[in-house]
Amino acid sequence: MSESETPQSHGAGAVVAFPGPAKPAAVTFDRRELSELLNLYGRMVAAGEWRDYAIDFLKDKAQFSVYRRTSEVPLYRIVKDPALAKRQGAYSIVAATGLILKRGSDLSRVLRVVDKKLSVVS
């Protein structure tokens, strides 16, 4: 059936195609989460630790990956996985080796693992 044709033009017993099931939306970071991630990224760039980042929105999780150099594997991956929210917490930090450094339900608390605050050395 073309766009100009209507179901009435085919007669009373015409079959109308309905859209299939809705595609599940990808998991994303909300504005507050992105603000926390980019604030940490800015501090680490200023400290000379990180140089690049990537954000991946997949159907079951979202990842914020940080790199020392663009051509390398990510130093850390900050992962949001809502399926783990009731068990270990939706957020986790994964090192380059695959080791999970910290898990939890509060992003700011999880990010403290990699956030090195500047301090005065005397």
Image (tube, rainbow, N blue to C red):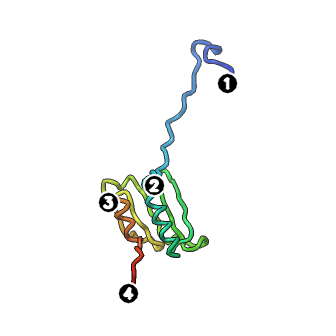
Badge 3 crowding class, 10 Å Cα cut-off, few under 14, some 14 to 19, many 20 or more, is few
- As measured in the structure, the alpha-carbon distance from the residue carrying label 3 to the one carrying label 4 is 40 Å
Q: Alpha carbon of mark 2 to alpha carbon of mark 1: how far?
A: 38 Å
Task: Identify the element where label 1 is drawn.
Answer: loop
Amino acid residing under circle 4: Ser
| Front disc: 4 or 2 | 4
- Could you tell me if the residues under marks 1 and 4 are in contact, i.e. CB atoms within 8 Å? no
- Upstream in the sequence, badge 3 or badge 2? 2
Residue at 49% x, 71% y: name it: 44
For the residue carrying disc 2, how many other residues have a C-alpha within 10 Å: few (<14), some (14-19), or many (20+)? Answer: some
Measuring from the top left, give residue 39's x and y in whole percent. 46, 63
Say which element carries label 2: loop
Q: Earlier in the sequence, mark 4 or mark 2?
A: 2
Task: Say which residue label 3 marks.
Answer: 88
Q: Are marks 2 and 1 in contact (CB under 8 Å)?
A: no
How far across and down, in percent of the image, does residue 40 sit? 45, 66
- Judge depth for marks 1 and 4 and give the one in front: 4
| Residue 59 position in % (x across, y down) | 49, 50
Q: In the image shown, does 110 or 82 lie closer to the viewer?
A: 110
| Depth check, front residue: 47 or 63 | 47
What whole-number distance in Å separates the C-alpha atoms at marks 3 and 2? 15 Å
Please give the residue where the numbered disc 2 appears in the rendered image.
61
Q: Residues within 10 Å of mark 4 (few under 14, many from 20)?
A: few
Q: Residue at x 37, y 57 (%)?
A: 90
